[in-house]
Amino acid sequence: DVPISQHKREGRGRTFSYAEISHITNDFQKAIGKGGSGSVYYGCLRDGKEVAVKIMTRSLPQGIKEYTAE
């Protein structure tokens, strides 16, 4: 599974490493949902902003387009 940075998708130019995503989500401890393309986890950035981190299932047959649309 691969986390995709919401900031990057929104055009803010920030990409997070897996280690950063793991820290932001406190090692993916709090699942807050599940979509057709993977699980969604609660996270908190250094500035205190709460975020949702979606993890894409590697086997997603529809590919990245559906993942980002979701």
Image (cartoon, rainbow, N blue to C red):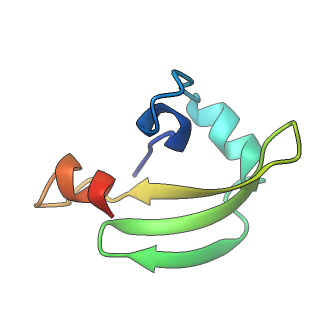
Q: Residue furthest left?
A: 61
Q: Residue furthest top?
A: 13
Give how far across and how far down residue 4 sits, in percent. 45, 42
Quarter-of-image position of residue 67: bottom left
Left or right, residue 4 beside residue 29: left
Q: How many marks?
A: 0
Give how far across and how far down residue 70 sits, in percent. 33, 64
Query: In the image, what residue occupies the spot 78% across and 53% down?
Result: 26
Quarter-of-image position of residue 32: bottom right
Q: Nearer the viewer, residue 39 or 70?
A: 70
Give how far across and how far down residue 7 sits, in percent. 55, 36
Q: Nearer the viewer, residue 29 or 36?
A: 36
Q: Look at the picture and state if 23 lies above or below 40.
A: above
Q: Look at the picture and state if 24 lies above or below 11.
A: below
Left or right, residue 19 beside residue 67: right
Query: In the image, what residue occupies the spot 68% across and 44% down?
Result: 22
Give how far across and how far down residue 50 sits, in percent. 77, 55
Left or right, residue 8 beside residue 26: left
Q: Look at the picture and state if 20 lies above or below 60.
A: above
Query: In the image, what residue occupies the spot 58% across and 28% down?
Result: 17
Query: In the image, what residue occupies the spot 49% across and 58% down?
Result: 54
Q: Look at the picture and state if 39 lies above or below 58.
A: below
Left or right, residue 67 beside residue 52: left
Q: Residue furthest front?
A: 11
Q: Nearer the viewer, residue 65 or 59?
A: 65
